[in-house]
Image (cartoon, grey):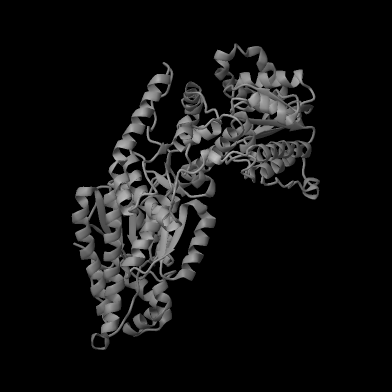
Amino acid sequence: MTSTLTNLWDDAVASRLDEPELLQYRSNLLGSDLRITNYGGGNTSAKIQMQDPLTSTDTTVLWVKGSGGDLGSIELNGFSTLYMDKLQQLKSLYRGKEFEDEMVGYLPHCTFNLNARAASIDTPLHAYIPHRHVDHMHPDSVIAIACTKDSQKLTEEIFEGALGWLPWQRPGYDLGLQLEAVCNENPNIKGVVLEGHGLFTWGDTSKDCYLNTIEVIQRASDWLARNNTKEAFGGSSIVLGLHQGSREKVAERLMPLIRGKITQGQKKVGHLNTSEAVLQFVNSVELKELAAMGTSCPDHFLRTKICPLVLDFNPDAVDLDIEIERCISGLDAQLESYREGYAAYYERCKNPTSPAMRDPNAVVYLVPGVGMITFAKDKPTARIAGEFYVNAINVMRDASGVSAYLGLDEQEAFDIEYWLLEEAKLQRMPKPKSLAGHVAFVSGGAGGIGKATARRMLEEGCCVVLADIDSESLAVAESELKQEFGPDFIRSVVCDVTSEASVSDAFNSVSREYGGVDIIVSNAGIASSAPLDETSLDLWNKNISILTTGYFIISRESFKLLKAQNTGGSYVFVASKNALVASPNASAYCTAKAAEIQLARSVALEGAPLGIRCNVVNPDAVLRGSKIWTGKWREERAAAYNMGEEELEQHYRNRSLLKLNVFPEDIAEAVYFFASDKSAKSTGNIINVDAGHAPSFTR
């Protein structure tokens, strides 16, 4: 049973909008539904009468989605604006298909009103279609029809002449002319299916165009639902299958290993997809055959590479642990085979002007019985690559269900992947931030220092997992940081650092969510104050359990993960001034903090041969935002210094050499320094962030 696309157009909202705003409104509606187009895919346009700023006369301006961006979130500044009369004049400069790439260089000369938004290579496709409003979408249902050996025949059968059809051609200037020609030759059609690519539709108004687009997509979807009666992908090849816990167990073991083995210069972040569509595909009889054919739609292909890597894993094995180890033992050979195959593909298809070969590792890893793992430069890119491959799965299922699925021709695929215009686009991308592709685990993440540390790393492109025993504060911190940095970059896990099982589960979660870890910030803490003769064994043990044993358990469990990845790593222990200089009435706390530093030195010694560093940040008197100061600690420290609680901040400030307050952000900056490559040649070291406390000088 197919799902029905909902008409989201609201006349009351639309009535308040001008033409450019209606284009944005339409674009946002279309981009909000992945059944219509995938993230970042598709284009919309409108030809709008506007006043020329030079002549004050009316002129027709093409508003079209600019290079990059996503329809679901596009704003007005995401559209390029170009003079239609100048775009028409470009036809006289066109020297033929072999020179079509040079036409992109003329587009800036057609810019209207000094708009800085770069025009997309799809601009001519919209410009030369002789209709005011145009949509170019990548719906799975239409691409499934476009990617069959009977594409033209099926288009005519399903749409009964209402849509035109064009054979596969790489997007560019010449395809724009082809679209213009088919529209002029068939003035009554409502759109065009592009073989192996997608759909163009249009209308006289923005609303007409929107309604036409969703009606065409729905018609294709309904037809497939009625006619695709075959068992998907030849049926299942799995007899027993795995339950969710077992699937997660396999992913937790494989993802860090794959991540380590494919890290070459730029670290990568993983994403696990175990959706119903993915499981149906990876468990199918035709998995290897269809996976080898690759994707068809250029938008799918550019995100997912020439084809995925299907891992050698048998989910029906009698002993799951033995099967995991067998799969792991063959990983190096499988990964190397894929790299060799990619290099051979590059050599077969390259031409004298081709850019140098890029990363030869797969993006998509399919694991029978488990799901799909994707790796990319950051979490959003990895997740979106997976979403695009789900689109490809949907296309393969429906195309092979009504005809025979056709993947993109190898040379055509190469010419898109290594297109000089695509290379130029990659070169224009901003330089990665200092922690891009890194994953950090921060214990005590819901507190002031933990949250400030997470924020500092997030600012540098890091993915962060907040761990804390306080579930309510943790949820608040996660929500706050997700709003600020987006949902892909932040996760949280309730974790008791004194429990081996809890810490082990936490790092399993990190592996499952991001593929591994690079930075471990041990920051979970408590504080207590009592005279020596009044310090109970329970109080002593509580300090040691959290501040020493907890740091040990986190270090040990994460060390296993870092060794498996074999790509180095960085530990930062957040200790205390009290680790170096004792305070009165705090023997348990001071002893536990001192032990942290000695543990850090031990980790530094054992980690160095593996490229794993460990350093310590010693804060002092961080009152603002610190959870330990909200309990009895403030009262107890005030009593220890024989003063009122309200005097503590001034007391600590005046005690410092610099007469300054110390804030969580100050500690976070030091943690970032040790976590990043800025301190790449530092291990076993200590930074005091205390505004100057002479007795705590480390030398």
- The quarter of the picture where residue 470 lies is bottom left
Identity of the residue drawn at 49% across and 22% down: 415
The foreground one among 685 and 381 is: 381
Quadrant (top left, top right, bottom left, bottom right) of the C terminus: bottom left
- Residue 93 in the figure: left or right of residue 304: right
Q: Where is residue 344 in the image (x, y as percent from the top left)?
A: 37, 24
Identity of the residue drawn at 33% across and 37% down: 334
Q: Is the residue 209 above or below the residue 172 in the image?
A: below
Q: Is the residue 317 above or below the residue 396 in the image?
A: below
- Residue 45 in the figure: left or right of residue 557: right
The foreground one among 463 and 583 is: 463
- Residue 73 in the figure: left or right of residue 379: right
Name the residue furthest bottom. 533
- The quarter of the picture where residue 163 lies is top right
Q: Position of residue 446 (x, y in %)?
A: 44, 66
Regarding residue 543, the answer to whether it shows in the image is yes
Count how many numbered circles sit on residues in the image: 0
Q: Position of residue 406 (x, y in %)?
A: 54, 27
Q: Is the residue 636 above or below the residue 117 in the image?
A: below
The foreground one among 349 and 540 is: 349
The foreground one among 547 and 274 is: 274
Q: Position of residue 465 (x, y in %)?
A: 42, 58
Regarding residue 52, the answer to whether it shows in the image is no
